[in-house]
Amino acid sequence: MTEPVAANDFIRDIIRRDNEQGTYGGRVQTRFPPEPNGYLHIGHAKAITVDFGTAEEFGGICNLRLDDTNPDTEETEFVDSILADITWLGFHPARLLHASDYFEQLYQWAEYLVGQGLAYVDDQDTETISAQRGGFGRPGVDSPFRDRGAEENLDLLRRMKAGEFAEGSRVLRAKIDMNHENMALRDPVMYRIRHSHHFRTGGDWCIYPTYDWAHGQSDAIEGVTHSICTLEFDTHRPLYDWYLSHLPLPGDQPKQIEFARLEFTHTITSKRRLAKLVADGTVDGWDDPRMPTLRGLRRRGYPAKAIRAFCAEIGTTRTNSRQNIEALESFVRRELNATAQRRMAVLHPLRLVLDNWPTDASGEPVVEHFDVANNPENAEDGTRQVAFSGELWIEADDFAEVPPPKFFRLSVGREVRLRGAYLVTATSVDKDADGTVVAVHATYDPATRGGDAPDGRKVKSTMHWVSAPHAVDITAALYERLFTAAVPGDATGEALDDLNPNSREIVPAKAEAALAGAAPGEVVQFERLGYFAHDPDQALLFHRTVGLRDEWAAIQRRQG
């Protein structure tokens, strides 16, 4: 069902080599391990496609494991949203697991390391421990509690677990090397005290494992073969291996592999900053169509297939880079061009009156209907009937009373084609008291039904329209970049300084009657205007997904 993430990349090369050497008996098992403290974003999409796609390609399995080791920030709401987003993206975990499933085993292994003299309880506070770690080129300082005996350490650890000590008063640290060049190996913290309610385990625990302590051991318990992470965990791999090599594992030791994370121009993926946008009311929530969250992109109309295809195209590397957001939009546009139904809508309506339009015997304007293709890219989508009358809505930008050079659309004395209908010529205008044009008068050529003149005369512009008596009122949300800078914060150091105050415009619009039947979440093409997604909750609100112009192609031409 799912597409492979890339035909060839270094991760697959590693797995092929392991399979050829029989490292895991030909078995491939991965996992996707997000922390349930927020909503998934576009950067997670890359990790999801790599984790799930790689396992699927090699006939293996991929589990979803929630890294629920911080009770202060995690909620069931986020667990549910993560599972829903993964499913929407097109993947299905073999099992839904939690790091908290292994709290007892992790604790028993912690006692094992204490007994081996490889872990100790430190009575110092976090700030002191951090200062003593030193820095690059500066040696660390041994804790005064580093040489405690195993028996005393074990007693203190058990008392920590029993809840005898206050938060921040003690931690359990691995005993490795305070002068190691890799800072991750300078006696890292394994457990900290948290007297907090955990959304799954309640009050059963008051000590919680750090990510580094829970990560590799959870992989080993589950039988993960290839633990695929983003590049920021590269320096943590020696610690990952150190823990595993000093424990009595139930099976093979998993292998951690790192790849570059996915970042885009004009976009941030920091959970802290995204949360601030929500809290400050800058956006309407985590599913605001301007947000880079998967549910925001879904609401905006991004097809999951396009996101997967983009991730496949860029593959995996070990070099961090920032992708142009226009490149992703190009994949979205390509997918929607093939699948979206076409409809006509006018975002900035101007009335067009056909003065010579016929009336019936009762004096009412005649109504005609035209068969219009639902999607020229797919004949199987068929046609629909669109009403046409003597009063229409056209885009205000499609008329100029005094046309500038190279303006080929409607102006007084000029003939244009109305999409699929007739050729019309503007004759005069009506203005309000301020001198603003409020209506354009025109005549139509009845011999040009369908849009072509029998005498072969040519016009330079084809315009879309909506029959005024048959129009439905809709609301369109038009979006620009949420951040004005290609790299938000590059100039000031704070990404939120580059917020675009004009990232959204809400406009009342007129649309053909067929749009009233659009399904919630359906994406359609507004002809000449772009792709728009029908809001899943608010009827007749349409979010502009992307425009019709392929900006990525233009960027590539300039760079070429």
Image: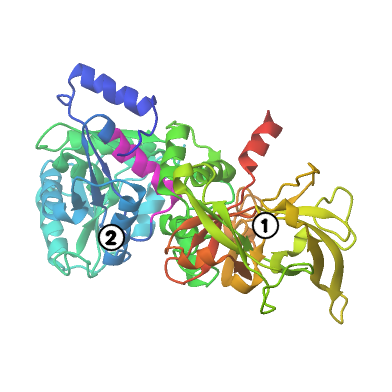
What type of secondary structure mainly makes up the magenta span? helix
For disc 1, the marked residue is 464
Kind of residue at badge 1 = His
Residue 79 numbered tag: 2
Separation (CA) of disc 1 from disc 2 = 45 Å
Residue 306 location, quadrant: top left
Q: Residue 320's spot in the image, x, y percent?
A: 49, 36
Kind of residue at badge 2 = Val
Q: Could you say whether the residue bearing mark 2 is in a helix, strand or loop?
A: helix
Residue at image coords 39%, 30%? 6
How crowded is the residue under tag 2: few (<14 C-alpha within 10 Å), some, or many (20+)? many
Q: Are marks 1 and 2 in contact (CB under 8 Å)?
A: no
Q: Residue furthest bottom?
A: 433
Q: Is residue 322 above or below residue 411?
A: above
Residue 401 numbered tag: none
Q: Residue furthest front?
A: 361
Q: Residue 197's spot in the image, x, y percent?
A: 22, 70
- How is the rendered protein coloured? rainbow
Residue sitting nearer the eye, 36 or 344: 344
Looking at the image, residue 399 sits to the left or right of residue 503; the answer is right
Q: Residue 313's spot in the image, x, y percent?
A: 46, 33
Q: Residue 444's spot in the image, x, y percent?
A: 77, 60
How crowded is the residue under tag 1: few (<14 C-alpha within 10 Å), some, or many (20+)? many
Count how many numbered circles sit on residues in the image. 2
Part of the protein shown in magenta = 40-55
Q: Quadrant of the N terminus?
A: top left
Q: Is residue 178 magenta?
A: no
Q: Is residue 184 above or below residue 84?
A: above
Looking at the image, residue 226 sits to the left or right of residue 114; the answer is right
Q: Quadrant of the C terminus?
A: top right
Residue at image coords 39%, 48%? 44
Q: Is residue 53 magenta?
A: yes
